């Protein structure tokens, strides 16, 4: 499982120009069952994504295709987590 942190860069003002493409990129990640949660980092610092069902190298490739990353609107950091305990509703995230 991974947490992707997308922190706004100095090009934050260009976010509007790339928002539709970024949202399409997010939708594609959800459609592939890779992204399971996405949202804003408050207050207006960027975004975050919870991802699973993907290798680190494939996720790095996917994140590097995000229009926000390509346009340097955000910088990306990927944090890998090996879940060991979870609420039963989240058992699907546990490392087997």
Image (cartoon, rainbow, N blue to C red):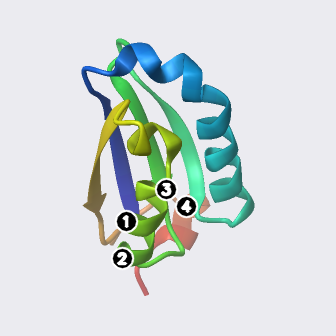
Marks 1/4: CA distance?
A: 24 Å
Instruction: Please give the residue where the numbered disc 4 appears in the rendered image.
Output: 90
Question: As displayed, is residue 46 above or below residue 94?
Answer: above
Q: Quadrant of residue 91?
A: bottom right
Give how far across and how far down residue 70 sits, in percent: 42, 45
Give how far across and how far down residue 37 sits, in percent: 56, 46
Residue 79 lies left or right of residue 21; in this view the side is: left
Marks 2/3: CA distance?
A: 13 Å
The single residue placed furthest to the right in the displayed view is 31
Instruction: Please give the residue where the numbered disc 1 appears in the rendered image.
Output: 60
Mark closer to the chain start, 2 or 3: 2
Q: Secondary structure at mark 4?
A: helix
Are the residues flagged by discs 1 and 2 in contact, CB closer than 8 Å? Answer: yes
Instruction: Please give the residue where the numbered disc 3 appears in the rendered image.
Output: 65
Q: Nearer the viewer, mark 4 or mark 3?
A: 3
Q: Quadrant of residue 90?
A: bottom right
Crowd band around label 1 with a 10 angstrom C-alpha radius: few (<14), some (14–19), many (20+): some
Q: Nearer the viewer, mark 2 or mark 3?
A: 3
Q: Which of 29/38 is in front?
A: 29
Marks 1/2: CA distance?
A: 5 Å
Mark closer to the chain start, 3 or 1: 1
- Say which residue appears at 40% left-offset and 43% top-offset: 69
Marks 4/3: CA distance?
A: 28 Å
Are the residues flagged by discs 1 and 4 in contact, CB closer than 8 Å? Answer: no
Instruction: Please give the residue where the numbered disc 2 appears in the rendered image.
Output: 57
Q: Nearer the viewer, mark 1 or mark 4?
A: 1
Crowd band around label 3 with a 10 angstrom C-alpha radius: few (<14), some (14–19), many (20+): some
Mark closer to the chain start, 4 or 2: 2
| Quarter containing the N terminus | bottom left
Crowd band around label 4 with a 10 angstrom C-alpha radius: few (<14), some (14–19), many (20+): few
């Amino acid at each position: 499982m991974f947490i992707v942190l997308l922190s706004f860069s100095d090009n934050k003002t260009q976010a509007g120009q790339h928002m539709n493409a970024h949202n399409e990129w997010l939708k594609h990640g959800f459609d592939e069952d890779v992204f399971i949660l996405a949202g804003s980092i408050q207050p207006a610092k960027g975004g975050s994504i919870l991802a699973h069902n993907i290798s680190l190298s494939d996720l790095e490739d996917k994140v590097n295709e995000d229009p926000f990353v390509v346009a340097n609107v955000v910088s990306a950091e990927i944090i890998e987590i090996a879940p060991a305990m979870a609420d039963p509703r989240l058992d699907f995230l546990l490392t087997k």
